[in-house]
Amino acid sequence: MTYQTHRRVVITGLGVVAPNAVGREAFWHATSRGIPAIKPVLRFPTIDLRIRVAGEVCDFRVEHHIERKLANRTDRMTHFVFAAVQEALQDAKLILEHEDPKCVGAVIANTAGGVEYVLQQIEALHVRGPRYMSAYTAIAWLQVANVGQTSVQYGLQGYCKTPVNDMVGGLDALGIAYAAIRRGAADVLITGGSESLLHPCVLLILGQSDHCATGDDPHAYRPFDQRAAGTILAEGAGICILEEYEHARSRSVPIYGEIVGYGQTNDARGLQAPAYNGKQYARAMYLAMKEAQIRPEEIGYFSLDGRAIPQSDEAEVDALQRTFGADRQYLPVSIPRTMFGHSFAAAGALDTIIAVLAFQYGMIPPTINCEQLIPQYGLNLVQNEARPLSHSTALIGGRGIGGANVVLAIKKV
Amino acid sequence: MTYNTFKRVVITGLGVVAPNGIGKEEFWQACIAGRSGVRRITRFDASFLPTQIAGEVLVFDPASLGLTEEESTILDRGTQFAVAAANLAFHDSGLSNTLSESERNSMGVCIGTVMASVEEGEKLWLQFTGRGAHPPRALKQDIQPATLLMSYVPASAIAAHLQLHGPCTVISTGCSAGADAIGQAVWAIQEGRANRMLAGGSDSAINPTGINVFSVMKALSTRNAEPERASRPYDGQRDGFVVAEGAGVVLLEERDLALERNAHLYAEIIAFTSNSNGHHMTALPEDGEPLQHLLRQTLEEAHITPGQLGYINSHGSSTPSNEVAETAAYKAIFGEHAYQIPISATKSMIGHTQGAASAIETIVTALVLDRQLIPPTINQQQRDPNCDLDYVPNVARYADVNIALTHSSGFGGVNSALVLARSDWMDR
């Protein structure tokens, strides 16, 4: 019979590619000050599109992060991954030559795949003929390209996975990687999410749904607000180096935080937006807190999903009510992503990075755009300006279409 | 520090939608008879492509497999396969739709897929751009929202269909996706995150893009004149893999729970291991070194010796390099035993169903343990001197099998393995 040892899992390195900054320090600088970063889309004409503003990653020089030949054989989502992974490994002071490559892997989520790359190749196929499609199409386009190229680049021979879970994939990746290290399937995992879906075809599709705010207003992402009309899309990547606690201690490196709980449930609502009620989301909160052995009153910050669709927001408030009851008026909550948009699979990883940086700097970054917050929701929302963080435990929540609810519990070590 | 006992996980339901059969019995009979499901492509006019053959599911009636009218309208084909296979597995396990709320809360879904919704994505692009005549433009009529972003849908469609509230995720790790999804689900039950999981894989990408991405890599067989003979793993005349579509889903259950309700146990899953090549996106080196590491680790984690392995369902994709690497890895790790272990490749009959492949192969492996009968590798005509093991050529065979291995290697460099044991084996 096998015995399971509960190994501890800590975060020792961070890497960020976000619309408001590339690099974790610049990212914290912008995020903690509430600086808005949503702008009109510049990479292609949007005149015929309903979605015209987004969180675009602007100051990103591909050649700084990836060798040219490889850059041409990979999609923008993978370029983001290379930049974020490089930063995170350096931040963690992890020298892979000193590690057993079989104990090091990667869990990187992605939802849309290499949209830009594959659509160019579909064009080549249909306009010029089958022979004109690049031989690299499959490996550039498929979601697995991100972990595949990372493992080739760094010679990783351990556990590698690619979760695909709509807007919550990055958070799910952290949960899956945490569980893998905890049970001993790996010692170090390069973990997070990347997304690059700002393409006219994607905007055409999402512009028809009620999940995204349309029009030209860069402040239109307003969760829990009277005017809530959907999220604003973004691109980017967030990477955390997850490491077994003793392994990190033996290297004497600073520890940002510890992942102590992971809860995942499903509303079972098919393709519908998260709504209905918060029952299953509350159960994900409960499962994460139970695994973490933390009580509601110990939580100093809850990073919310904040979908900005009225019924989804109501369901999130319902979930908080079920979990925290009247005490939720004391629970500081925020959706810092209102500043730079929702980057699908990258979002949960960026939310987690913000939460561990909040531990480090003792501040909770604000939510912007919500001047007409619905008072009945009774949220203790950190608005417009950062607020001091009082406790050393945080929850990060996220939901996907169809009702995937993921909650991660983290703690300052 | 806390110590917990991992729970034991058994397979109690099988559901399969494959080019050579739908439902476990029809599929199994086809496999035992060595019937191929590879034909000339009918889903689109493939005459402009170098490869014009594939493993298609020719007769698929969603309604008769329990899908609602809405599901058969809005879900992409691969997702419909997934829901159908999940339904088949669910009912095969003897569970009924009267599960209690707490049972639904502790039952989840994990599905592997590689190319979900590429068919819809390609169609939309053609519409948005007038077949490439102009930049993408809005259409007059409404389209299904989020179609292009649907890779995660197979799992959430199953959860919605059966109203399951446990953990629900898609894993997209190339050709090992189905086994990875099953492995993750096994871990979820072992760790107590769920006590039942529907897990497996699905894919349907028989469309110009889905075929041609592999043609331009020169990875596909071009044996267009003899479709049934095109997928021939280990054979000296193999010239590439054959794209196929399908789904395979197993119902995994915590063993005590299954015993309590007198469920039929097809097999127990005693180990899941996974690693990465770390040197190449698509191919194993000739000596199969990463696969060697994986096999060694798998024996350790399953606490078994090579001599105990009674059957291997291999990756066997019918590409010239894969089977050489596989054979070399078996010999390096299993030594003399490599020559004694019967090995068969399901892909010889149905082609490569991508995200579904390793899930369907897990189903075959479970049935081998359950029925003590080994399906063949078909199309074995000319021996490849580098592939000199027992590939159960052309004809099925009875055998005593207590422990069996299935493994796969995929795009992106992930290799995964599952070890299954006869359900009564661990009690001895």
Image (cartoon, coloured by chain):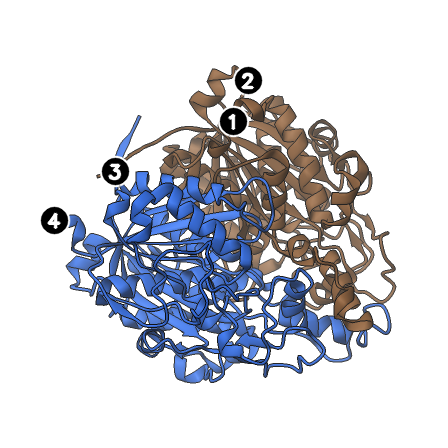
Q: Which mark is residue B428?
A: 4
Q: Which residue is drawn at 53% across and 47% down?
A: B284
Q: In this view, does A372 lie to the left or right of A375?
A: right
Q: How far apart are marks 1 and 4 (CA)?
A: 46 Å
* Residue A47 point in image, percent of width and height: 88, 63
Vertical placement of residue B273 versus A136, above or below = above
Say which label, 2 or 3, has the lower sequence index: 3
Identify residue for label 3: A2
Residue type of the residue flagged with mark 1: Gly
Q: Distance between the residues labelled 2 and 4?
A: 48 Å
* Residue B391 point in image, percent of width and height: 37, 61
Q: In this view, does A21 lie to the left or right of A44?
A: left
* Residue B367 point in image, percent of width and height: 28, 66
Q: Distance between the residues labelled 2 and 3?
A: 32 Å
Observer able to see residue A191: yes
Q: Which mark is residue A257?
A: 1
In what element is the residue under mark 2?
Answer: loop
- The blue-tinted chain is B
Mark 2 or 4: in front is 4
Mark 1 or 4: in front is 4
Mark 2 or 3: in front is 3
* Rendered colour, chain A: brown
Q: Residue at x 49, y 74 (%)?
A: B80
Q: Residue at x 21, y 55 (%)?
A: B402
Mark 1 or 3: in front is 3
In what element is the residue under mark 4?
Answer: loop
Quick check: do tags 2 and 1 share a chain? yes
Say which label, 1 or 3, has the lower sequence index: 3
Say whether marks 2 and 3 touch (CB < 8 Å). Answer: no
